[in-house]
Structures are given as structure tokens and as C-alpha cells.
Image (cartoon, grey):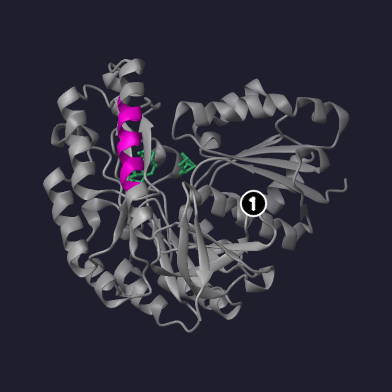
Amino acid sequence: MHMSTLHIKTYGCQMNKHDSDRIASMLSTSLGLKLVHTAEEADIILFNTCSIREKAANKIFSDLGRIKPLTLKKKNLIIGVGGCVAVQAAETIFKRVPYVNLVFGPQSLYRLPTLLMQAQHKRIIDIDYTPIEKLENLPLPSDYQPSADVSIIEGCHHFCTYCIVPYVRGRAVSRSFSSILNEVNVLAKNGTKEIHLLGQNVNCYLDARQHNIRRLSDLLYRIADIPGVERIRMTTSHPAYFSTDLIQAYRDLPKIVNHVHLPVQSGSNTVLKKMNRKYTKEDYLRLTDALKTIRPNISISSDFIVGFPFETDADFEDTLNLVRQIRFDRSSFSFMYNPRPQTKAAKFGDPVPLWVKKERIKILQKLLLKYERAISQSMLHTIQRILITGTAKKSPHQVSGRTENNRIVNIDGSSSLIGKMLNVRVIQVMSNSLQGKVIE
Ligand code: SAH
Ligand code: SF4
Ligand code: F3S
């Protein structure tokens, strides 16, 4: 059978998006598949799913329902379901949706060329995971990107009581120091200026191969030394593992952006303990104070969960007070608690009523927006260094880039500017972006 086109739909986190990019480039190299934008044009449709909340996990079933007519029209169409729901519910997917040909886990991506060939003849489930194989076996990026994601650690073993990630993504495994540096070198040679290090907890990175201990800070010093690399971003950092050497790296290396995504989840010590987050509100404040001492303007963003089992009004008030103290920045996310299968917290039930969760999230998001807007306003007339990554969404005569603290800045200019780092003056502040003017 002839397979020539591929469509991928991605849900969930940056790790998943990165996985989808890797799938596309790997299948283009190995099977010559061309990525297409709609499911209708495709010979192969892959869904890269997310299981973090029930709503996200259920999307896959409605989306599979939506493409059913295509499977009737195109007899040889291959449908694959990958990602975190694939691990959590492989059998269910197979049973409920007879036209799914292949279920693959986040760690079996690199076997996809073979799996897809086999899936033409029989239905296949491959959700085994040996994360190390994936990290060391994925092909190097071949196309040029101004800003590129680089995965450094896969999975997680912290077992926050609400979280399904350790069950679907596997325990944390760090990629080898040399293979990361090799990838960054290749990217930098291709012209990439910004390196975005990815992992569920990047600061738990640890390579102890060959009797050498290398931590995230070691990696940062080495990456900052690679010619061509101008900026380093990271997502996500865990507050309990933000060690002194990492704080020192933030002090020593101006290439690390002035932003840290440091999810606190809650400002109540009782809730943090029940969540098994392994830090207190005081620890968090000490850490952010230390970061603010070496970088007074550092932008800090966070994830929050409201309505965790038995969260009282007073607990929630603690979260709001912490927000007032820290003044979190843009790129903060808040979620209503949602019990997930297998997790410890699922045993507590879901005692906080939905209307209470809804009220709390509304109050929290309003407060977060207030600080985000105040920080944006304070950037008016300042000079910001931005990396131009593409044409502006709303105007063909503009290109856009990002500030270190994740603001989109649009400036007049053509696509020839893509990939350039420019100093711009912020001339207008809008709700979701800034207007800038290049300064010489
Ligand atoms: N590894 C990161 C977070 C990964 S998941 C960390 O530890 O910070 C992304 C976010 O989803 C979490 O920070 C949390 O806020 C949210 N989340 C995870 N499980 C959830 C659940 N069961 N209900 C609601 N939100 C959840
Ligand atoms: Fe989930 Fe906690 Fe691991 Fe983050 S640290 S992925 S919230 S278990
Ligand atoms: Fe979702 Fe899996 Fe990422 S559950 S958030 S896609 S690690």
C-alpha cells in the first residue's frame, strides 16, 4: 500500500508538541511522509494525546468519532493513537474504536516507522516504555528553527498525589549529557539562537553515566558556551529541587532568560502537604527571594490547582496572598482539581463542589491577570531584546518575536527578519501583545 501523507493532532504539554515535531521529521526522513494540515488529505492520522485532566483525555474519543466517515471513504487509512491516554487506556481505545490500527506510547515513538508498516496488516499496541531508548534514539533535527525545543529529561517520579504523569509517562530518565550537547551544537550550527530545554522537571536532570555527575547547572554552563546560542529557556522547574548551583547559574549566565516557570500549585501548607509537593510556602518564598536577589526583575510564573480535596476558604486565601506577594507573571496557568485514575488523591474523592471551584478559579485568574497587566504596562517605553520567530498573526506587514518574559512583540518588517535578535522599544501595550519599534 502507498502511504505518502501524514496528519498529526497534538494535545497537552510542550513535551507532547515536541514529540509530534519529532514524529513528523522522523517519518519524513524514514518513510518520505509529507505533513498535511487536514485529516482529509492524510493517508495516516496520528493523535498525540494528553491525560492530565479528564476533559483532555476524553477529547480523543470525540475526535476519533469525528473522523469515522473518513475511515469508511478511505479503506487503507491508518489511524494511530499515541501519547499519555494511549498508555492509560490502550485496551479501551482498541475495544471502543475498531478502526484504530495502532496504539503507541510516548516512549515508542522511535519505533513508529516499523509500527506503521506492521499496522497496515494487523492492529498493534506498543506501549512498552524504556524511556532511555527514546531519548537516545530519536533522530537529530534537520530543519532550521530560530527557537528549538530540546528534551533533556523524560517522565517523572515525584508522585504529586493529584498527578497522572508518573503513571503514563514513566519514571524520570535523564538523557545523556553528550547527546544533548551534540543536539544543541547541531541546532546552533543550523542557526538556532534560542534553546528551550524541556522536561516535566528540568531541574531534576542528572546524568551519572561513566562515574561523572552532571546536573542541570553543568548543562547550562556548557550550552551557554556554544557559539550561536544566545538564549536559553527552560520548562518546567520544580520548587523543591531548585538547588544553589542552579541559582548560581542564573547569576552567572545572562543567556538564561529572565523568566522562570516555577509551579507552586497552592499557597497553603496543609494543601501542599496533601499534594506531596515537598516544599512549604515559606520554602517557596525563600527560593523566589533568592532568585530576585540575583535578578531583581525576574519574571516568575506558576501553575495553580484550585479545589484540591478539602481545600478550605482559608487555604484558598493563602494562595491569593501568595499571588499578591510574588506578583506572578504571564504564562501562569490555573486549573480546577480533577481526580485522575491510579493517583493517591483520587481516593479522597472530589469533595469541593464544582461551583466553589468555579468561583475560586475566577477570583484567582482575575488576580493573576491584574499583575500580568501591571507588568506589561511597566514595560511601556522600555527597550526589550526579542528573537523574531515568524510573521505577525494579524498583519502581513509585521513580524513577531518574544521578550524574555514571554510577551509577544509585533514590529513592522518582512519575513527576512525571522531568526534575528533585535532591540526594540515598546511603543504600545495591548492585552495579549506589545507593539515595538526597532532601535538601531
Ligand atoms: N511537572 C510540572 C507540571 C506538569 S502537569 C510540575 O510539577 O509543576 C501541568 C499542570 O497540570 C500541573 O502543574 C498542575 O497544575 C496541573 N494538574 C496536574 N494534575 C492535575 C489534576 N489532577 N487536576 C487539575 N490540574 C492538574
Ligand atoms: Fe506531576 Fe508532580 Fe511530576 Fe509535576 S512533579 S509531573 S505535578 S507528579
Ligand atoms: Fe498531558 Fe502527558 Fe504532557 S498527560 S501534560 S501530555 S506528559
Residue 140 screen position, x and y as percent? 60, 68
Q: Residue at x 14, y 37 (%)?
A: 269
Identify whether 35 is placed above or below 149.
Answer: above
Q: Name the residue beneath numbered marker 1.
A: 394
Q: Residue 361 colored magenta?
A: yes
Q: Is residue 161 left or right of residue 340?
A: left
Residue 189 screen position, x and y as percent? 58, 80
Of residues 289 and 74, which is closer to you in this image?
289
Q: Residue at x 36, y 36 (%)?
A: 334
Q: Is residue 214 visible?
A: no
Q: Is residue 374 left or right of residue 149?
A: left
* Quadrant where the image shows the N terminus: top right
Q: In which quadrant of the rendered view does residue 144 lie? A: bottom right
Residue 414 screen position, x and y as percent? 68, 69
Q: Main secondary structure of the magenta part?
A: helix
Q: Where is ligand 2, by quadrant?
A: top left
Bounds of the magenta segment? 360-372
Q: Residue 259 colored magenta?
A: no
Of residues 377 and 343, which is closer to you in this image?
377
Residue 433 screen position, x and y as percent? 49, 53
Identify whether 215 is placed above or below 367.
Answer: below
Q: Is residue 186 left or right of residue 343?
A: right
